[in-house]
Image: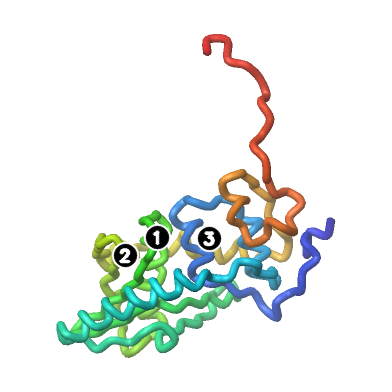
Amino acid sequence: MDSNNPLGLEKRPSPYVWVTWLAPYLSGENQCRFSLWNQGNFRVPSSNDMPSDWLVQHQSLLNEVAHDLRVDGYEVEEEDANSLYLKTSAGVTLAGKPDIVARNGKGLVVDVKTEKPRGKDRAQVNLYQALIPAQKLHGIQEAPWGRLVYRDGKDKLIPPNEVDEAFKQSVRNLMQVVAQTTAPNPQPSLSECRFCKCRELCPFAQNEPPETRGTVPWL
């Protein structure tokens, strides 16, 4: 197996990472950096199209939140107008697209979620909070407040001070992983592999529960 291209994929012109790929690693939900490295350096075929009902629900919730913010006096930018593209010191392009970026004296970044809350949601917003001032998106030069809005009515505010040096170092560490010329060791697990974009191609993917390896006498 070629350690420079273990899955035999088409190489990207330069390393590229999307914010949503990083969030599960920052929250501790994902551990297999082999998957992140492959996604960042190669074009991994995608077989998971967003279901149409998800798109409708997401857009409906986004429209509702954006409307309420405008009623409250905010200037509001949505989705494509919020595109972020930044080159990191590791040579990796980091990109993202917050659902809503609003301004009313101070900045606010909002992500709307139609599924149940997960730890990666907060990490995703933290990344937007860190990247928006780096690009000076819509003139915002300091880390904005963050907000997560869920379809079930949950609403979480996230203070700017969560984007501290420890968080930034965690992001830098992941960028260094993606910038490596050779693949990191795989860390397959049933729970992580089942949702991995590389699963169909990866020879290390775990698709079945591990076999029982022994007994516990006292059970």
Q: Which residue is at the front of the view, 194 or 147?
A: 194
137 with respect to 107 (left or right): right
Q: Residues within 10 Å of mark 1 (few under 14, many from 20)?
A: few
Q: Residue at x 75, y 59 (%)?
A: 201
Query: N-terminal of the two: label 2 or label 1?
Result: 1
Measure the C-alpha gap from mark 2 to mark 1.
7 Å
Per the rendering, the mark at residue 156 is: none
Query: Contact (CB < 8 A) between labels 2 and 1?
Result: yes
Disc 2: which residue: 151
Which label sits in the foreground, 3 or 2?
2
Quadrant location of the N terminus in the rendered image: bottom right
Which sits in the foreground, 120 or 137?
A: 120
Q: Position of residue 181 (x, y in %)?
A: 72, 65
- Relative to 73, does residue 25 appear above or below in the rendering? above
Q: Which residue is mark 1?
A: 115
Q: Which residue is painted at 65% across and 69% down in the image?
A: 46
